[in-house]
Image: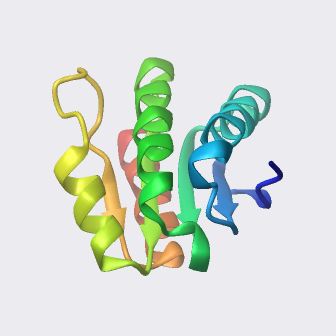
Amino acid sequence: MAVMVSHALDQGVLVVTVHDDPGSDGRAVLLARISDLVKGRAPTSLVLVLDGPAAADSAVGVVLRVHRLCNRLGLVMSVATHSAPVRRLLEADADTDIGGTRLVVLARADTALQLTAAALTAAA
């Protein structure tokens, strides 16, 4: 299954936008693509944007796994989605006991990028 993903590097922050609902069959493919981008681009942090149809329950598990990866790599991660139900699911299911940073879930991608970049500047 092909899941449309685009990415850009902005201020050292990798911004990955998922354009399609991965469905149950596409979750593993989506996780692998995002993981490869994170490992290959070596960003300072990640903003994951669930755009339109990608903001589905099937993407929540992928986001949470990517958050665990980012914590292992020492990266700050934010998620942006317009879907209030998906935001609530992510906030409720985010693993806070993994010893890393809290998953930040926002409605707007530009706000997520600004806050993530600002957090990096403050930490430096």
What residue appears at the point 68 percent right and 40 percent down from the top-left corner? Answer: 34
Task: State the image coordinates of residue 97 (x, y, percent, origin top left).
Answer: 16, 25
What residue appears at the point 45 percent right and 79 percent down from the top-left corner? Answer: 108
Question: In this figure, what is the number of numbered marks?
Answer: 0
> Seen from this angle, which residue lies furthest front?
25
Q: Quadrant of residue 21?
A: bottom right
In this rendered view, identify the residue nearer to me: 41 or 79.
Answer: 79
Q: Quadrant of residue 6?
A: bottom right
**Whether residue 20 can be seen here:** yes
What residue appears at the point 58 percent right and 67 percent down from the top-left corner? Answer: 54
From the viewer's perspective, is residue 14 above or below residue 100? below
In the picture provided, is 6 more to the left or to the right than 23?
right
In the picture provided, is 47 more to the left or to the right than 20?
left
What residue appears at the point 55 percent right and 56 percent down from the top-left corner? Answer: 48
From the viewer's perspective, is residue 31 above or below residue 18? above
> Seen from this angle, which residue lies furthest right?
2
In this rendered view, identify the residue nearer to me: 122 or 96.
Answer: 96
In this rendered view, identify the residue nearer to me: 113 or 61.
Answer: 61
